[in-house]
Amino acid sequence: MRLIGFLRPTILHKITYLVIGGYFPEGIRSKRFDWKVYNNLKNVVVEGQQLKNTVVQYSELSNVLVVPNFKDFPLKNISTRKYSSNIFMFVFVGQISEGKGIREILEAREILKNRGFRFQIDFFGPFEEDFSLDSEMSAYCGFLDFQSDAEQSYSRLSEYDSLLFPTYWKGEGFPGVIIDAFVAGLPVIATDWNMNREIIEDNVNGFIIEPKNSEVLAEKMIWVMENQAVLKAIGENNSKKGKEFQIDEIWPKLIKYVVF
């Protein structure tokens, strides 16, 4: 978007800036971005009300609109895992990095192992450059490709009982992985970070916990393992809620902001 400053106002009034993630609001807040540069745009579209509130609070922009994140996923019903006391299946999907809470997951895993719980945590996603893990990462499972192989990826995700998302990454916006979890019928354990609370209603379609705290994460993981009847109801609701973020539902609203 650095080219904006070189464009004529007559051109700028035809441009809608679709903001992905939370970098833009944070840049406005920290004054790394000059909000005046974006004042002549037709619209600035962010993914959530909290992100809009940040932009409005730290600028005088009046062209900020909200359209939630969306995806193109299979509309047919995806079978969800039947909960069992045999072994509980947690999953993490995303960048394998410090900011995504991987260390907290591994520390929570040790707490649960030491207390004798039967469970498994699998990890999917790319590694952040220079981020290394020891043999404790033996449950690394590669990638889930929701773009080119959506049906198989959602089917694989639906085999799990709960998604772990203890992020404190500074650029977090409206995480697409939460949509993926909803579509697959998974309750989400997520940190109270950026937009997570706006997307996840605590104890309704997931659980909100304190960030950067492996003990709190471990206690919530134990709670969900011991309350699987609640998880089943949440998972069924999430399968329905996930359809709200289908591209066919969001596109009509978005297109009216984008067209000239």
Image (cartoon, rainbow, N blue to C red):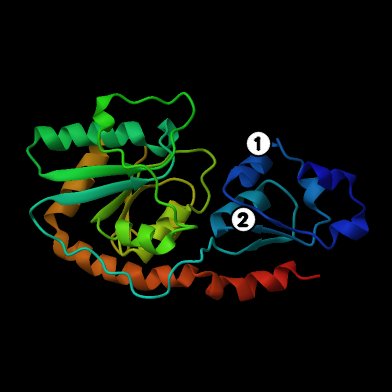
Q: CA distance from mark 1 to mark 2?
A: 15 Å
Residue on which disc 2 sits: 52
Q: Amino acid at mark 1?
A: Ser
Q: Position of residue 52 (x, y in %)?
A: 62, 55
Seen in the image, is 57 located left or right of residue 81? right
Q: Is residue 200 visible?
A: no
- Residue 30 bears which disc, if any? 1
Q: Amino acid at mark 2?
A: Lys
Q: Position of residue 254 (x, y in %)?
A: 65, 69
Determine the residue positioned at 63% across, 46% down. Answer: 25
- Sooner in the amino-acid sequence: mark 1 or mark 2: 1
Determine the residue positioned at 54% across, 69% down. Answer: 247
Q: Is residue 7 above or below residue 228?
A: above
Res 191 → quadrant: top left
Q: Position of residue 12 (x, y in %)?
A: 85, 56
Q: Secondary structure at mark 1?
A: helix
* Residue placed most toward the observer, 199 or 153: 153
Q: Secondary structure at mark 2?
A: helix
Q: Is residue 208 above or below residue 98?
A: below
* Residue placed most toward the observer, 255 or 50: 255
Q: Which corner quadrant holds the N terminus?
A: top right
Q: Position of residue 130 (x, y in %)?
A: 47, 23
- Residue 169 bears which disc, if any? none
Determine the residue positioned at 68% across, 71% down. Answer: 255
Seen in the image, is 159 located left or right of residue 113? right
Seen in the image, is 114 located left or right of residue 163? left
Q: Is residue 238 above or below residue 58?
A: below
* Residue placed most toward the observer, 53 or 181: 181
